[in-house]
Amino acid sequence: MAHGHFVRNGKPEDMIKGLRRNKRVFAYYALAGAIALLGIASGAMALAYDHSGWLNVAKTVLGLGFAGHFILFTFEIGTSILQTSRLINAINDREK
């Protein structure tokens, strides 16, 4: 801990790297959301015009959106578990 904040390996640079990684992940969430929105829009076009071409586009784009969200959620859960474990270990080490 440094100044009341957890710092991995005692280096503030590691905190900056983590914040930059989080910023990238948030940007990827925005991109995945935009892809999902395009998938919904193309699905609406397929329904409105009863056109199989739009249906194929909707399936592909929605699939990409779902896959992107799955990857991002899995990454977020994994990094949250890792960070929580590190914080618990740091607190336990500090109490010793």
Image (cartoon, helix red, strand yellow):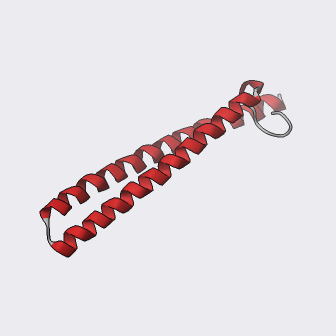
Quadrant of the rendering where the C terminus is positioned: top right
For the point 37% across and 58% down, the residue is 36
Farthest residue, direction bottom = 48
For the point 73% across and 24% down, the residue is 9
Image position of 30 with respect to 52: above or below? above
Quadrant of the rendering where the N terminus is positioned: top right
The quarter holding residue 95 reads top right
Image location of residue 17, percent across then percent down: 65, 33
Image position of 67 with respect to 82: above or below? below
Image location of residue 10, percent across then percent down: 77, 26
Image location of residue 18, percent across then percent down: 64, 36
For this view, does 85 lie left or right of residue 76?
right
For this view, does 66 lie left or right of residue 79?
left
Farthest residue, direction right = 3
Front in this rendered view, residue 86 or 8: 8
Front in this rendered view, residue 45 or 81: 45
Image location of residue 3, percent across then percent down: 86, 37
